[in-house]
Image (spheres, rainbow, N blue to C red):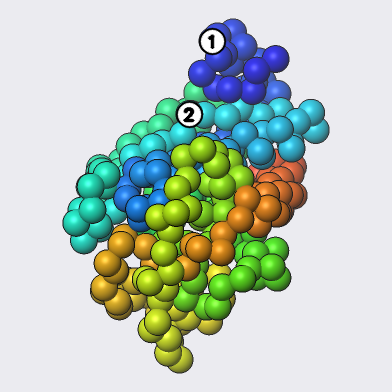
Amino acid sequence: MSYLFRDQSWLQMQEHIDKKSLVILPVGTTEEHGPHLPVDTDARIAEAYGHGLAQALQPELPVLLMDTIRYGYSMKVMRQWPGTVIVRSRVFMDMVFDICRSTLDMGFDKLVLLDCHGHHGGALNVVSRELCDATDKAVAIISPATMSRDAYQKIRKTEPGGSIHACEWETSLVLHISPEVVDMSKATDEDAMRYHSEFVAGDNFSGGQKVTWSTWYLQASRTGIYGAPVQATAELGRVCMEAAVENGARFLKEYWHKRDVPVVDGVYL
């Protein structure tokens, strides 16, 4: 039987509600990713990650995978390269809220968002809290970047500054998922992040970031890249995706099995 949300009839949907299926909503966007990657890079990774998780969780957990959100918020500075579609942040947040609220209101109580775009982190965190207030149900958020960080750090070839946007990590993942849409002859390391300080890690994976300070205003990019994608490989992408799926699936089993703590008159039982 299909695990795709869109394939279900309402009768099948009710069966999934009755058996408390976990709903997975991948969230990507459409924006430029340098001269070598497709503009749907984040959405492509999100979709592949969703399928990987659904397949890893079955048959132990009942799962439904929703269609990937393919448009979202990006900063206007990215419009200097064509291909960036920007949904205003509050519009994006309202859309995600309404999709999730509809899903939770129909009877599902376990829903996870796959955060696969750097500009969405804060927005999705706010939405998750608003959903708690509205439904008394807790939505989870996981990211393939976070879930693959340790594995990536062990085998990456670039120094800190090599993995922020259209970088070694993203390029490796797309080489693994869809090599036919990557043109490595146009990849360049000229826009590797060179700014590092006590407060700024200069990389999404090296750790040590103590402040919020937009990459796009730290260093000008000539190519739409921040990082060093030249040494990316499909094998590195495979390792990262497998790590992200393994770690994500372990968390989602914990999330699914954890049921509400009963509360009576404000006291936990």
Check the image and report above or below for 191 versus 18. below
In this figure, which residue is indicated by the disc labeled 1?
Answer: 10
**Is residue 78 found left or right of 235 in the rendered image?**
left
Residue shown at 30% from the left, 62% from the top: 223
Nearer the observer, 156 or 132: 156
Say which quadrant the N terminus sits in. top right
Quick check: can you spot residue 46? no
Q: Residues within 10 Å of mark 2 (few under 14, many from 20)?
A: some
Nearer the observer, 132 or 147: 147
Q: Amino acid at mark 2?
A: Asp
Residue 93, given in percent of the width and then of the height, sits at 33, 45
The image quarter containing residue 153 is: bottom right
Report if the CB atoms under discs 1 and 2 are less than 8 Å apart. Answer: no
Is label 1 or label 2 in front?
2
Nearer the observer, 152 or 255: 152
Residue shown at 36% from the left, 44% from the top: 39
Residue shown at 56% from the left, 73% from the top: 158
In this figure, which residue is indicated by the disc labeled 2?
Answer: 67
Mark 2, secondary structure of its residue? loop
Residue 105, given in percent of the width and then of the height, sits at 47, 28
Quick check: can you spot residue 229? yes
Q: Amino acid at mark 1?
A: Trp
Tell which residue pokes out farthest to the front in this image.
Answer: 185
Q: Earlier in the sequence, mark 1 or mark 2?
A: 1
Tell which residue pokes out farthest to the right in this image.
Answer: 60
Residue 258, given in percent of the width and then of the height, sits at 71, 46
Mark 1, secondary structure of its residue? helix
